[in-house]
Amino acid sequence: MRVLTVDDSRAVRSIVRKQITEMGFEAIEAEDGQQGLEKLKEGEIDLVLLDVTMPVMDGPAMLAKMREGGSKIPVIMLTSESKRSIVANAMRLGISDYILKPFKPEELRTKMLKVLDGDELAPAGDGAAAAAAQEAAPAPGTRQFIDVMLVDDMENVSRKLRALLPPHMTMHSFISAQPALNAAKEKMYRVVMIDADLADVQSSVLGHQLRMLQPHVAVLALPLRSTNDVARELKAEGFDGVFFKPFTQDDMDDFLQRYFDSQDILTAEDNVLRAGPFHGKDERMGHYFEKLHELYAAALVKVASACYDEVILDLSQAPARQEKMPKAVMQFAAEAGSAGLDLRLVVNAETKKILAAFTETRDLPLFASMQEARAGKAA
């Protein structure tokens, strides 16, 4: 087995190389994503251990180029960020698993062996639950990431929730606790929703067990609507929030905005901010840009506090709309200037054309890739 470790930290590469060689595997090293891609061309690689933040080309950019080129090599991402936004962005890029820095050697060993063995758990449950669990089946040797786990012993609840969720979102449904716990050992979930009145286990106990397996996950209870302050009682039991039955579209919109929109709209690592794609109807486009601006403003404070000289904003996946993008970019530039930061924008060809048509944005430094933005070489 040949394992490629890509990290700009010599100390981290040394730790990883030691673990790889002790497992009897061959260790290949690269200092950044560009070197990593070159190493992939030199010989067969069975697994890539990939850092997120690196100069020249970062981890997400390298992974994107791997997948664009048709590579299906499993990737374990190494990140110092435990926020769900970072994990979610990595999920979309097609990683097999991730490890938070600093990590213990035995944790790295366990995750490497699991990915290399390709040991996937068979879907549990029956009826509608089993059918839902088949969603988005992973390719051999990759780990599956799912947006929502539902644990409810009434199959109609699964059907109702699936009907309200956007089509691009994935969901696994289970009718009892043990299959859900088994799945949580093998797959990664972003939100867990648990019936407040399960037959086989206390809901708060199951929520705690799932959180132990996946510390990043948000755990919500599904109670019936009541005049009592059920939400406060369930939060006192350890739940992050509630989603009342029977479900409504308004509740779903609030749920998506709270637990998914903010993660999808903007992700941040160090001084690099990435705007996600827009999903939904055109009438919600305004909400996307409002939320993007809100998250951007908060992220700028952290970038400035960390004493960076510039902030890189990747808008290549953001919707290129002439009626929205120029105004948003003007706000981004003005706020970066007020924070004492130079703004570098990564944009696609369509967005570049739109910005060039406006006096206020035509002279802004625009870059065609993250690599060029890091180097300061405008497109």
Image (cartoon, rainbow, N blue to C red):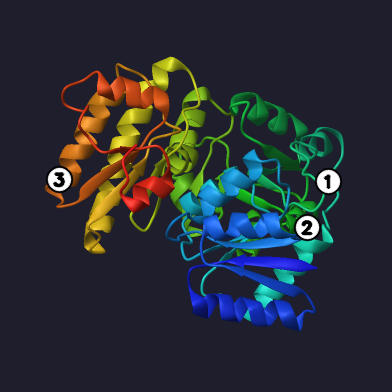
Residue at 77 percent of width and 79 percent of height: 23
Q: Residue at x 40, y 22 (%)?
A: 350
Q: Whole-percent x and y of residue 295? A: 32, 43
- The amino acid on which the numbered mark 1 sits, given as a three-letter code, is Pro
In the visual, does 40 lie left or right of 220?
right
3 or 1: tag closer to the N-terminus: 1
Q: Which mark is residue 123?
A: 1
The disc label shown at residue 329, or none: none
Quadrant for the N terminus, please. Answer: bottom right
| Count of marks, rendered view | 3
Contact, mark 3 vs mark 1 (Cβ under 8 Å) = no
**Does 151 sit left or right of 52 as displayed?**
right
| Residue indicated by mark 3 | 337
Q: Position of residue 78 (x, y in %)?
A: 56, 64
Q: Which residue type does callout 2 highlight?
A: Asn
262 or 337, which is in the foreground?
337
* Residue 182, label in figure: 2
Judged by depth in the image, the label closer to the viewer, 3 or 2, is 3
Q: Quadrant of the C terminus?
A: top left
Q: Is residue 364 visible?
A: yes
Question: Which residue does the image show at 41% across and 43% down from the upper left?
Answer: 274
* Above or below: residue 339 compared with residue 169: below
Amino acid on which disc 3 is placed: Gly
Quarter assignment of residue 44: bottom right
Name which quarter of the figure residue 335 lies in: top left
Label 2's element? helix
**Does 50 sit above or below residue 88?**
below
Work out whether mark 3 precedes mark 2 in sequence or the reverse, and give the earlier one: 2
Observer-nearest of 132 and 230: 132
